[in-house]
Amino acid sequence: MTSTKKIQNPKTQLSKKSAVNDSDMLSSALATEKNMCNSYAIAMPEASNSKFYSSLFDMMKETSQQHRKLYDLQFQHGWCSLTPAQSSEVTALYQEYTEYKQQLK
């Protein structure tokens, strides 16, 4: 049975005066950081040399860390929530993953 209890902080009140509020700007920044991480992940294996690869890796790491900070900020303000998974669900997914992994060998 899936738990519907959410893990969430109290929501920070937002101004109704502006068409774009802090939550909107943070969501946009998060989407940008996520897209940048994905782009770096695609570009890194295609780097022409190891120095370029290392530079891309460093940029991806920095971008990923910034992405995490923005997500934490969004969570602190109560603008996103998490739903805890049951341990049986985690176990089932892990077993499924393990079986797929075995098939690839």
Image (cartoon, grey):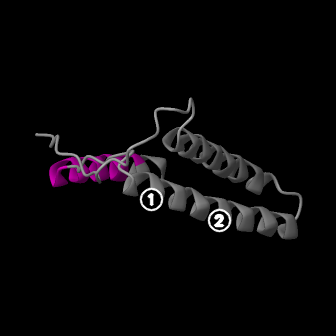
Q: Quickly name the residue at label 2.
A: 61
Span shown in magenta: 86-100
Q: In the current view of this chain or complex, which residue is farthest to the left?
A: 1
Left or right of 89, for residue 55: right
Q: Nearer the viewer, mark 1 or mark 2?
A: 1
Magenta stretch secondary structure, dominant:
helix
Residue 90 magenta = yes
Q: Position of residue 18 (x, y in %)?
A: 55, 33
Q: In the current view of this chain or complex, which residue is farthest to the right?
A: 48
Q: Quickly name the residue at label 1.
A: 72
Q: Nearer the viewer, residue 34 or 21?
A: 21
Q: Residue at 49% across / 42% down in the picture?
A: 23
The disc placed on residue 40 is none
Amino acid type of the residue tagged 2 in the rendering:
Lys
Dot 1 crowding, Cα within 10 Å, few <14, some 14–19, many 20+:
few
Q: Residue at 52% across / 60% down in the picture?
A: 68
At numbered mark 2, what does the secondary structure look like: helix, strand or loop? helix
Dot 2 crowding, Cα within 10 Å, few <14, some 14–19, many 20+:
some
Left or right of 54, for residue 66: left
Left or right of 53, for residue 1: left
Please tell me in which quadrant of the rendered image residue 25 appears: top right
Amino acid type of the residue tagged 1 in the rendering:
Asp
Q: Nearer the viewer, residue 45 or 22?
A: 22
Which quadrant does the N terminus fall into?
Answer: top left
At numbered mark 1, what does the secondary structure look like: helix, strand or loop? helix
Q: Nearer the viewer, residue 36 or 89?
A: 36
Q: Residue at 28% across / 51% down in the picture?
A: 8
Residue 48 magenta = no
Q: Nearer the viewer, residue 84 or 5?
A: 5
Q: In the current view of this chain or complex, which residue is farthest to the top?
A: 19
Q: Position of residue 12 (x, y in %)?
A: 37, 49
